[in-house]
Image (cartoon, rainbow, N blue to C red):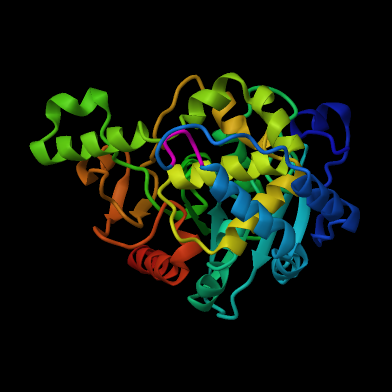
Amino acid sequence: MAVPAAHAEATGAIMDTRVRPFRIDIPQAELDDLNDRLARTRWPRQLPGEGADRGVPVAEVRELAAYWRTAYDWRIHERRLNAFPQYLTTIDGLDLHFLHVRSPRPDAVPLLLSHGWPNSVVEFTRLIGPLTERGFHVVAPSVPGFAFSEGPRETGFGVDRVARMWAGLMSRLGYDRYGTQGGDLGAYLAPAVARVAPAHVIGVHINGGFGFPTEKDLPELTSDERALYDMIQQWSRGGVDHHTLLRHTPQTFAYGWHDSPVAQLAWMMQKFRDFGVQGMDRDLFLTNVTLYWLTGTSGTSSWFMYERDEFTWPEGQRQVPTGVYCGPPAVRRLAERDNLIVHWPESNPGHHFVGMDEPETLAADIRTFFDKIL
C-alpha cells in the first residue's frame, strides 16, 4: 500500500509516482453472477398511485432489468471504454484511475474533466472525441470512491482534498497550465482546483450551478428572479433528497445497492429521472449502472454527501475566468458575486448530464469559452 503524502517525509518512505497503464477486464464469473441475480430478483408489488408518484414503477424497472439481463452486452462497452488510454497512479495515498486522451493538434489545451454523481467517466465517452478534435488534451479521472479509483479511508474527506489531488495529477502528467470543467459534483471540483492551484488553471467551465438564488437572497430578488427561485424550489421538492438521505445513513442504503442489481438499477433510474434526464440511450445508461455494480461503489461514492452538514450550491472563485454552459434558471448577477463570469449563454440544449446527449454542443461551448480567455 502506498504511503500517504502527509506521512511520507516523516517515515522516510519513497512516494510512488508511477503512472501505470490500466485496462478494464471484468472476470466472466462476475458477469455470470450479475445475470443470475437479475434472474432471481424478488419483485415487490406495485404500490397504489399514478405514474411515478411512489417511485419508479415496477413495470418500468422490470422491463429495463430484462433488457439488462438478456440484451445488454457489457463486453461491447468494456471494449469501447478500453479504446481510451487509461491509467492508475497513487496520489495522497489513494490509487487514482483516469483517462488521458491527447489531441492531434500541436497547440492543444490540457483540459481536466470532473464527472458528476451518480455518474462516472462514462459521462464523457461521447464528449472526449469532439474535445480532442477541437484542440484539447483530455484528462478525465474517476473521482475517489467511484469506479476504479480508491475511496476515502477516513472521515473528513472533501472537495478541496480532491482538488489538490487533481492538481497533483496534472503536474505529474507534465501539464503546468490547464483548464478545468465539470457538472454536478464536477461543478464543485472544477472551481476548487482553481482555488487550490490558481497559478496553473487557465479558466473554469461548468455545465451549470453558479448563481442559483437562495432564501437569503429573497429580499433583493426582482419579480423575474423570484420566479426563477420558485422554479428551483419546485424542482428540488419533486425528487428524492439524496443529500439528506446519504448525509445520515449511507451505510444502511449501501447494503441494498451492493447486494441487489435491481436495487442499484431502480435507484439510478430514480435519480436520473429526478435530474430531468429523458430519452437517454439505454445502453449508455446501463453502462454507468453496470460500472457501479461491478466495482461495488454505490456506498463509497457517497462521501460528498455524508461529509457535509448541509446542502449548498457550488462555491465559485475569482482567481481565473469562468464560463457556464447554460445559466438560467440561475441569475448571472448572483453568480458574479463570487466568479469572474465571461461566458453565460441563455439557451444551450441538454439535460443535467449534458455531455451524454449533447456532446458536440457542449464541446463547442467549451471551445468558445477558452477561445475568449486564451
Q: Give, as a single range, the part of the protein colored magenta.
A: 52-56
Task: Looking at the picture, tell me which residue is in the foreground, 81 or 259.
Answer: 259
Decide if residue 206 is in sight here: yes
Q: Quadrant of residue 76?
A: bottom right
Q: Is residue 231 above or below residue 132?
A: above
Q: Is residue 259 above or below residue 112?
A: above
Residue 24 x, y percent position in the rendering = 80, 60
- Residue 131: percent from the left, percent from the top? 51, 71
Q: Position of residue 224 (x, y in %)?
A: 12, 41
- Decide which of 153, 231 is in the foreground and name it: 231
Give the answer, above or below, for where 183 lies relative to 306. Answer: below
| Number of numbered markers | 0
Residue 280 shown left or right of residue 39 in the figure: left
The quadrant in which the N terminus is found is top right
Q: Quadrant of the C terminus?
A: bottom left
Residue ID at (56%, 48%):
59
Left or right placement of residue 337 versus residue 11 in this view: left
Residue drawn at point x = 63 percent, y = 56 percent:
286
Q: Is residue 346 magenta?
A: no
Q: Is residue 144 left or right of residue 353?
A: right
- The answer to whether residue 77 is left or right of residue 233 is right
Indicate the quadrant where residue 85 lies.
Answer: bottom right
Provide the major secondary structure of the magenta segment. Answer: loop
Residue 118 vertical placement versus 105 (above, below): above
Q: Quadrant of residue 317?
A: top left
Q: Nearer the viewer, residue 271 or 244?
A: 271
Residue name at image x 76 percent, y 36 percent: 259
Rendered location of residue 371, percent (x, y): 37, 69
